[in-house]
Image (cartoon, grey):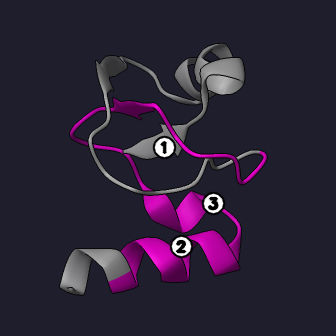
Amino acid sequence: MVWVCECHVSKGINMLDIPHVKKSSLNVKCLFCQNKAQYEVFYNDFNYSTLQPSISRLVKVKANA
């Protein structure tokens, strides 16, 4: 899953092979610009290790919280 703001929904969708989109109720930042994310763009088999190392670490920390 990636979190994106309203301006970057299309960019987030294009990162994933078979994406799903839903409104986010979490207080997280957009992957691309750090604005408040309004949508969750995800699919079950997304490999976070392909992201930049700093983003990958952030996702792992949130998953373990």
In this rendering, the answer to whether 22 lies above or below 54 is above
- Check whether the beta carbons of the residues at disc 2 and disc 3 lie within 8 A of each other: yes
In this rendering, the answer to whether 49 lies above or below 6 is below
Distance from the alpha carbon under mark 1 to that under mark 2: 13 Å
Q: Secondary structure at mark 1?
A: strand
Q: Is residue 43 left or right of residue 6?
A: left
Q: Nearer the viewer, mark 1 or mark 3?
A: 1
Residue 40 visible in the picture:
yes
- Check whether the beta carbons of the residues at disc 1 and disc 2 lie within 8 A of each other: no
Q: Residue at x 56, y 36 (%)?
A: 4
Q: Secondary structure at mark 2?
A: helix
In this rendering, the answer to whether 58 lies above or below 36 is below
Residue 11 visible in the picture:
no
- Check whether the beta carbons of the residues at disc 1 and disc 3 lie within 8 A of each other: no
Q: Nearer the viewer, residue 1 or 22?
A: 22
Residue type, label 2: Ser
Tell me the quadrant of the picture where the N terminus can be found.
Answer: top left
Residue 63: % across, % down? 25, 75
Distance from the alpha carbon under mark 1 to that under mark 3: 13 Å
Tell me the quadrant of the picture where the C terminus can be found.
Answer: bottom left
Give the residue pinned by disc 1. 3
User: Which region of the structure is painted magenta?
Assistant: 33-61
Residue 38: % across, % down? 46, 32
Q: Secondary structure at mark 3?
A: loop
Q: Residue at x 37, y 85 (%)?
A: 61
Q: Is residue 43 left or right of residue 33?
A: left
Residue type, label 3: Leu
What number is the disc on residue 56? 2
Give the residue pinned by disc 3. 51
34 part of magenta stretch = yes
Sequence-wise first label, 2 or 3: 3
- How many numbered discs, if any? 3
